């Protein structure tokens, strides 16, 4: 009789442990990084073929990928895929691992967990390469509030992280410049920076997939010689027109021939990713701001008279790191043109010295 009672008691104890695990799951429903605990059951040893009841097996934790949630907190991080954050409890001199990334900056300037454990990172042993257009700030803090890119480049000998940020150029962009030469509207400056950000990230992704030195891209330049503009643009109803990348742009006569040409160039400069200028000889020059980007220019005319388009510099796509560097330079220029500042930080981890790498507090 006693073995039978014990079997029942063991089953109740096992079920109690399962309920405890489930209640713990419910209690931690809002805990950062927590997924679930799972209890497995096993039968007890047998004597003469008679079972000895049930027992709760090992409690296993679910470390699978969860959903990402934007918190707006500056130091909240999340792991995409496998892995853990390494943290250090200085009071107990213990190294611990967690998936929870709700971090903060401690009073000593180190990155810490909510419990005050120091978040650990590999000491790369080299000084980060920082490129900044700001006169005094060369770290990724205020005023660099806008994230441009973040890319990891892996090779057999090193791991390189490239991170770029900018100030809020949307707020600082202003319309300025000389008509027909350097004129640019605020909205066009913002549009150019957005286009170059996309191109820069595309170049980074390509470089990550194939981390080679590569070749430098070349920006395309087209020109149109409107040699008779001075006699063709003389009165109301006259116009100058060209098709760029499938879109038609027309400028009606305004004031005089040169003013009309300048206004035409200003209008072309509103095209995302392009600059245009006009000179006193009637030459309109259209330049791609995105290195390697193709430019399609045609159907140039004044009134009904057609003019030829000449590609003075053909686009060259470029590749690898050389393309990334060229895109970065062009992006930096466009952000500065919009009244902003740009910063790029490169950290390199040398894998040839991997066995000697040490963990250190992240600051």
Image: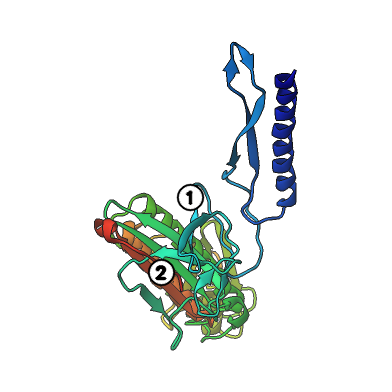
Report helix, strand or loop for mark 2. helix
Residue 326 picture location, percent across and down: 36, 67
Name the quarter where the N terminus is drawn. Answer: top right
The image quadrant that residue 158 belongs to is bottom left
* Circles 1 and 2: CB atoms closer than 8 Å: no
Q: Is residue 148 at all visible to an observer of this figure?
A: yes
Instruction: Name the quadrant containing residue 353.
Output: bottom left
The earlier-in-sequence mark between 1 and 2 is 1
Left or right position of 18 against 358: right
Say which quarter of the image contains residue 358: bottom left
Q: Residue furthest front?
A: 2
Badge 1 local density, few (<14 within 10 Å), some, or many (20+)?
A: few
The image's mark for residue 263 is none
Residues under labels 1 and 2: Cα distance? 31 Å
| Residue 16: percent from left, percent from top | 74, 37
Does residue 297 appear in this view?
no
Picture residue at 45% right of the left edge, 70% below the top: 362
Image coordinates of residue 206 in percent, x first then y, are: 39, 53
Q: Which residue is mark 2?
A: 328
- For image coordinates 40% across by 66% down, the residue present is 327
Q: Which residue is mark 1?
A: 83
As drawn, is 160 to the left or to the right of 114? Answer: left
Picture layout, residue 11 above or below residue 312: above
Judged from this view, the residue extending furthest toward the left is: 352
Whether residue 279 sits left or right of residue 358 in the image: it is: right
In the picture provided, is 24 more to the left or to the right than 187? right
For the residue pair 88 and 178, the one nearer the viewer reads as 88
Q: Mark 1 or mark 2, which is nearer to you?
A: 1
């Amino acid at each position: 009789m006693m073995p039978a009672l014990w079997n029942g008691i063991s089953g109740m104890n096992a079920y109690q442990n399962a309920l405890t695990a489930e209640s713990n799951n419910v209690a931690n429903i809002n805990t950062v990084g927590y997924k679930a605990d799972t209890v497995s059951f096993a039968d007890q040893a047998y004597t003469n073929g008679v079972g000895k009841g049930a027992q709760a097996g090992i409690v296993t934790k679910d470390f699978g990928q969860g959903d990402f949630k934007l918190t707006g907190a500056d130091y909240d991080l999340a792991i995409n895929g496998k892995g853990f954050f390494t943290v250090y409890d200085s009071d107990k001199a213990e190294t611990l691992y967690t998936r929870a990334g709700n971090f903060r900056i401690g009073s000593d300037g180190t990155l810490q967990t909510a419990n005050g454990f120091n978040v650990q990172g590999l000491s790369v042993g080299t000084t980060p390469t920082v490129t900044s257009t700001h006169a005094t700030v060369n770290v990724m803090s205020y005023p660099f509030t806008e994230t441009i890119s973040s890319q990891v480049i892996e090779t057999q000998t090193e791991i390189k992280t490239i991170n770029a940020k900018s100030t809020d150029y949307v707020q600082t962009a202003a319309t300025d410049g000389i008509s027909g030469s350097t004129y640019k509207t605020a909205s066009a400056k913002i549009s150019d920076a957005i286009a170059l950000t996309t191109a820069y990230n595309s170049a980074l992704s390509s470089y990550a997939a194939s981390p080679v030195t590569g070749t430098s891209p070349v920006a395309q330049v087209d020109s149109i010689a409107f040699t008779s503009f001075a006699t063709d643009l003389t009165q109301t109803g006259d116009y100058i027109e060209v098709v760029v990348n499938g879109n038609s742009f027309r400028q009606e006569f305004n004031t005089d021939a040169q003013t009309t040409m300048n206004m035409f160039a200003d209008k072309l400069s509103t095209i995302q990713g392009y600059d245009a200028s006009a000179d006193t000889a009637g030459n309109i020059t259209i330049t791609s701001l995105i290195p390697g980007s193709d430019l399609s220019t045609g159907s140039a005319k004044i009134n009904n008279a057609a003019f030829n388009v000449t590609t003075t510099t053909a686009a060259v796509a470029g590749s690898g790191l050389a393309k990334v560097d060229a895109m970065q330079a062009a992006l930096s220029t466009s952000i500065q043109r919009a009244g902003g500042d740009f910063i790029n930080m490169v950290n390199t981890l040398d894998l040839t010295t991997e066995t000697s790498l040490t963990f250190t507090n992240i600051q």
